[in-house]
């Protein structure tokens, strides 16, 4: 593949002088930097959607009959997950950028596990709230 | 001998990556605008705050991507993370305070 700048390990930028936000290593190919940034933005749109979903459940849904805490039990974890995804996306963006600069393997992302685990939990909880509500 | 033709359109036009990134920033700004507008109905001031970040995020993506060689600038990405986190905190607070049917007071009395 013809990569302008020579790829992650031999970028055209040369050695850095320790400026803030550029912790050593070589300037990576701009395309890698931009792809990393897009990934960060995509996770943040997901985070925003989670917050809005939680907000909608708590504020807009009518209460579950017989389960007054039901909306909070479902909505608040989604909102907290949204904040967690956003902060984690930023931390992983920094880590990936550092790995690109040093030509090391990219760190594994914890976001898929975090997202899948919490959404599964909320789904189970939603089923439980509906069953309890129907039984009353 | 010329190199074999690449399957990756970005090898033909490397500017596409920059364009895609700019569009991703625009999508993110639109998402913030939609959320801010939806929040206006219930919470006026937080909704206005989120709406106010929309042009900021759009401008960051539009103008900050002219940085030579795509040098990382953590500050502008922090704008996005901090705004999402702020909205989440406001959402949790809004879920529990006040006198409405979702307030903590009402929950504990039921």
Image (spheres, coloured by chain):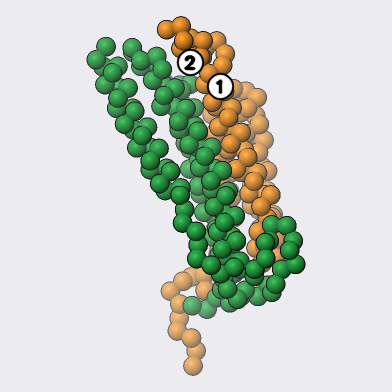
Mark 1 lies on a secondary structure that is: helix
Q: State the image coordinates of residue A68 (x, y, percent, origin top left).
A: 39, 14
Q: Chain of mark 1?
A: B
- Disc 1 crowd rating (10 Å Cα; few below 14, some 14-19, many 20+) is some
Q: Are marks 2 and 1 on the same chain?
A: yes
Disc 2 and disc 1 in contact, CB within 8 angstroms: no
* Residue in the foreground of this view, choosing between A134 and A107: A107
Number of labelled discs?
Answer: 2
Q: State the image coordinates of residue A35 (x, y, percent, origin top left).
A: 54, 60
- Residue A62 versus residue B65 in the image, above or below: above
Disc 2: which residue: B102
* Residue in the foreground of this view, choosing between A75 and B16: A75
Q: Which chain is orange?
A: B
- Quadrant assignment, res A121: top left
Q: State the image coordinates of residue A95 (x, y, percent, origin top left).
A: 57, 56
| Disc with the residue nearer the chain's start (2 vs 1) | 1
Report whether residue A67 is seen: yes
- Quadrant assignment, res B73: bottom right
Query: Which residue occupies 59% across, 60% down?
Result: A97
* Residue in the foreground of this view, choosing between B7 and A88: A88
Q: Which chain is green?
A: A
In the displayed structure image, the side of residue B52 where residue A57 appears, left or right:
left
Disc 1: which residue: B94
- Disc 2 crowd rating (10 Å Cα; few below 14, some 14-19, many 20+) is many
User: As drawn, which residue projects farthest toward the left?
Assistant: A135
In 3D space, how far apart are the residues under numbered discs 2 and 1 (Cα atoms)? 9 Å
* Residue in the foreground of this view, choosing between A103 and A131: A103
Query: Which residue occupies 65% across, 75% down?
Result: A12
- Residue A82 versus residue A4 in the image, above or below: above
- Residue B53 versus residue B40 in the image, above or below: below
């Amino acid at each position: 593949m013809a990569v302008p700048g020579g790829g992650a390990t031999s970028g055209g930028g040369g050695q850095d002088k320790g400026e803030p936000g550029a912790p050593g290593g070589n300037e990576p190919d701009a395309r890698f930097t931009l792809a990393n940034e897009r990934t960060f933005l995509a996770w943040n749109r997901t985070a925003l959607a989670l917050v809005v979903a939680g907000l909608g459940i708590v504020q807009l849904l009518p209460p579950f009959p017989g389960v007054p805490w039901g909306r909070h039990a479902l909505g608040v974890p989604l909102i907290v997950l949204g904040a967690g995804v956003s902060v984690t996306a930023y931390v992983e963006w920094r880590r990936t950028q550092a790995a690109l600069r040093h030509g090391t393997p990219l760190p594994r992302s914890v976001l898929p596990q975090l997202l899948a685990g919490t959404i599964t939990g909320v789904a189970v909880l939603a089923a439980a709230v509906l069953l309890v509500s129907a039984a009353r | 001998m010329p190199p074999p033709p690449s399957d990756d359109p970005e090898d033909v036009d490397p500017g596409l990556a920059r364009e895609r990134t700019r569009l991703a920033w625009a999508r993110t700004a639109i998402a913030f605008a939609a959320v801010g507008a939806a929040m206006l109905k219930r919470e006026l001031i937080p909704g206005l705050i989120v709406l106010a970040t929309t042009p900021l995020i759009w401008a960051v993506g539009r103008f900050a991507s002219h940085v030579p060689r795509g040098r990382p600038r953590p500050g502008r990405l922090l704008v996005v993370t901090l705004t999402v986190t702020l909205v989440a905190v406001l959402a949790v607070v809004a879920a529990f305070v006040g006198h409405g049917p979702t307030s903590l007071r009402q929950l504990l009395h039921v």
